Image (cartoon, helix red, strand yellow):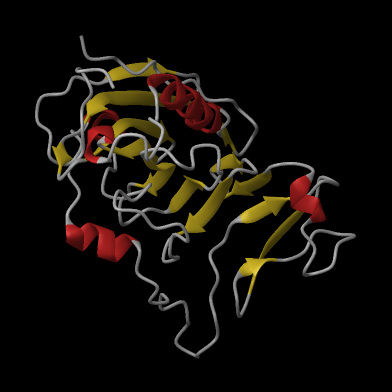
Amino acid sequence: MSSSRIFILFSGALLLTACSTTPPDNTTGSGNVACTMEAKLCPDGSYVGRVPPSCNFAPCPGTSSGSTASSSSMPQTVSDNTISFSVPSDFALAVQGEAIQKPSYIPPCNDGFTYCLYYTGNQYQGTNFESAGLSIVKRTDLTTKNTCLTRQPDGYTSITPVTHEGTTYATSVFAPLGDAAMGHYAQDQLYRLSVGSSCYEFRTRIGSTQFANYPPGTIKEFSTSDEATLQASLDSILHGITLKDGTSLTFPAAPTQS
């Protein structure tokens, strides 16, 4: 790993919260289940929503409720009526209130995510790799374009964001971020999107355990090449996000630490 790597500190409380299996209170006052309002794109171009009581997506036309054929032929695409994004086959999606089904010491997304796309592939089994993910948070506390693009990430005070002005939106990036503790570390990049009156925050993360902590010969090293490959997958998800009208987004390149 490069000596210029930066790291993120994760508390035990954060891990316990992120991996909690306690179900959210998704009921209305009348006791009816109220599912979140995402829509999934089906292979035939139609959309299906989440249905109670499980709040899973309804089956696409031409498939049974237990069939996965529709998702195997193309990435799952989700829209919240402002942005749309795709979930590759080697990633899983958790929405606000759902537990991440592949827990790790370093969670792929911080607690409080609106969406968490986390890596579930097995390419890096037997290495010191821990987790990777892209979190999406709708920042309702950042109500203006300026605060959305420039408000410092939690725990930071002096990072200068790089910004990009689109025709109907604006984006920014804060990088690099991080810290380290107890032999675990992660590399994060944080992006923001201001569109209309909405502000979204996107955070990519790759977490690993210190390779030197393992007895020699017991595992392979999660190499810088492996990390670059996985970061490219996260970047591909990020740059595949579109607005509701199909407008593609441009995010500034993340600065690297010299």
Question: How far across and down, in percent of the image, does residue 51 sit?
Answer: 66, 72
At horizontal 80% and vertical 59% (from top left) the residue drawn is 60
Residue drawn at (38%, 47%) of the image: 108
Q: How many marks?
A: 0
In-front residue for pair 103/233: 103
- Judging depth in this view, the residue of 224 and 119 nearest the camera is 224
Left or right: 94 as drawn, with respect to 150 = right
Q: Is residue 206 left or right of residue 256?
A: right
Answer whether residue 222 is visible to the viewer in this image. Answer: yes
- Residue 196: percent from left, percent from top: 44, 37
> In the figure, 202 relative to 25: above or below?
above
Q: Residue furthest right?
A: 62
Q: Residue at x 26, y 49 (%)?
A: 141
Rendered image quadrant of residue 158: top left
Residue 144 position in % (x across, y down): 29, 37
Closer to the camera in the image, 194 or 7: 7
